[in-house]
Amino acid sequence: MYFGDGWKSYYCERLIQADTVLDSIVRDGNRIFIGSGCGEPQHLVRSLLPLLARRRDLELVQNHSIGAIPEDWSDLATHCSLRTFFVGPKSRKAVNFGLADYVPIYFSSIPRLFREEGSLGIDVALVQVSPPDGHGFCSLGIAVDITKAGAETARQVVAQVNPKMPRTLGDSFLHVTSIQHFVEYEEPLLEIVFRERSAVAERIARYVSSLVEDGSTIQVGMGRIANSVLHYLEDKKDLGVHAEIITDSHLSLVRKGVINGSRKNFHQGKIITSTCLGSRELYDFVHNNPEVELYPIDYVNDSRIISRNDQMVTINSALEIDFTGQVCADSIGHKVYSGIGGYVDFMHGASHAQRGRTIIALPSTSPDGKKSRIVSHLTNGAGVVSPRSTVQYVVTEFGIAYLHGKTIRERALALINIAHPKFRERLLEEAKRLRYVYQDQILAPIFEPLYPGQWETYQIFPGGGQVFFRPVKPTDERALQEFFYSLPDQDIYYRFLSAMTVFPHRNTQSMVNIDYEHEMAIVGVTGEIGNETIVALGRYILDQKSNMAEVDFAVRADWQRGGIGTFLLHYLCQIAKSKGISGFTAYVLAANRRMLGIFHKVGYVVHSHFEDGIYEISFRFDEPAQACVTDECSVENSQ
């Protein structure tokens, strides 16, 4: 559509003072939309508030109040109600005291409320825009989200024209002829900077970062954990962004070259978002920047659009999760804390994307440490924001639980093992009472409360096979059974010195529930986290009286003769030495020449005693051999 230069006179004719225009157009019973988040037109809102007491039955509609809207709504309640789609610090008190109303809704569905006749018609929209460009287009800048739909459907639009509002690209523009009144007023935009960090958030972020692969397109919520997660992505390559919100933490990754969108298959090279919540530095970055495009929320949060991004990873927080995987993220019992927001939009979108991942990150306890956030059932009144069917990964400071495609028993065990240690016994008893787990189920003895992630490492072996080595986890029980069943009968005999044919739960659960101090087991795995196949196992058990540990290891037949057994023995030596263990003992059948050869190349003086066809082997770490065939330093350097 071509407007020519006629818009200039249209604009000048409609310039007016805020209090004058609001007093003339706001009538009893009106529904007034206010622009969201950091894009809130503060001057217009400040001018509106004194007028509210002189009108009746008004309703304010806003998505995320962080500016001039008062926290205490008691004096205004008889004149005006507040309807919000997301409860933040400014509206939480009013909502939970019954003085304001919360609408639980997907963000992507809000614009349709405005557009559908008889649903949520807007009488007056108060928005903030950049000054018009040479063609008469104003940009909604850092807050396109639901604001564009609110402005396009309102009977009258009042725009605060602020030179400090950046001109953002994408679908952010309103032509001046679609706005009825202009109030020129320059003031700083609202800013939100998340600088708080905590040890718990940092540890959660470290685990989450391990789930984000190079080339992924990411969506991360906001808050302390989200900020920490983005900080821990600094070693990634070629990340893209498709998210309802971007913050200064995203900007930091852009500046470091981590976020460049080069491997995005949809909107390649572009940061796609709907809202900016950050500092002036972020707002200056997005100004007139072709790398960043802002679109309305019903586009950005459309799960069909989201799913078009290959390797889409969505990372969000939660307040509670139950054994079955139901997530509560918007309320604490009956008290509303935040909102559904784009939570489900992105969970569904990422779930349907090629190689997409959904991640829920939460501290294991409430802030005071008195309640577990992993529970047998959600608190009475808590809302299910995400159903048990869409969650893939759950992360706490104690590790990662993979739920997708798992049974209720497997989910309960996985979640209990990443709960805070002080709650695990009680949670296990609740799971047994509910018949979610075996009645003889045990937990790992808690010597070291944190999973020893420092002993995770990747190794590449001849032929290009890459194996991930890590400490065994309680959730490895089934995979360990499958590993044992995959071994040839001869290897079983070599490994156990007996002709075992079955490996029942009662035996294998004790192998995966270990304390990581007196007993250590390292598994070599292939495949994605949560769907791993064990190809090798090495373990030792300490005799505290002698301070010597009995060691053994096994490798799947199709992975043998590639150096995995040698690596495992050296790696276990490294771990044992770090814990002050004196050395290893082992029992090896005389016929098992390969394993005997590995021990004799270990790099320590090997003592052996032969009896009844079995070698009893021992070596001490303080007795190095004259020559070390395998360079142990290479193992240490792999960390």
Image (tube, rainbow, N blue to C red):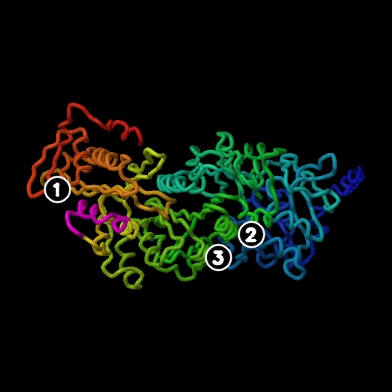
Q: Secondary structure at mark 3?
A: helix
Q: Residue furthest top?
A: 626
| Residue type pointed to by label 2 | Phe
Q: Residue at x 84, y 53 (%)?
A: 180
Is residue 484 covered in magenta?
yes
> Cα distance, mark 2 to mark 3?
21 Å
Q: Which residue is mark 2?
A: 107
Q: Residue furthest bottom?
A: 434
Q: Is residue 62 left or right of residue 204?
A: right
Prevailing secondary structure of the magenta residues? helix
Q: Is residue 339 visible?
A: no
Q: Which residue is mark 3?
A: 96
User: Residue 141 sits in which quadrant?
Assistant: top right
Q: Is residue 257 left or right of residue 441?
A: right
Q: Is residue 359 left or right of residue 181?
A: left
Q: Nearer the viewer, mark 2 or mark 1?
A: 1
Mark carried by residue 589: none
Rendering coords of residue 54 (x, y %): 75, 63
Rendering coords of residue 627 (x, y %): 20, 27
| Residue type pointed to by label 1 | Asp
Q: Residue at x 80, y 47 (%)?
A: 183
Q: Which residue is mark 1?
A: 543
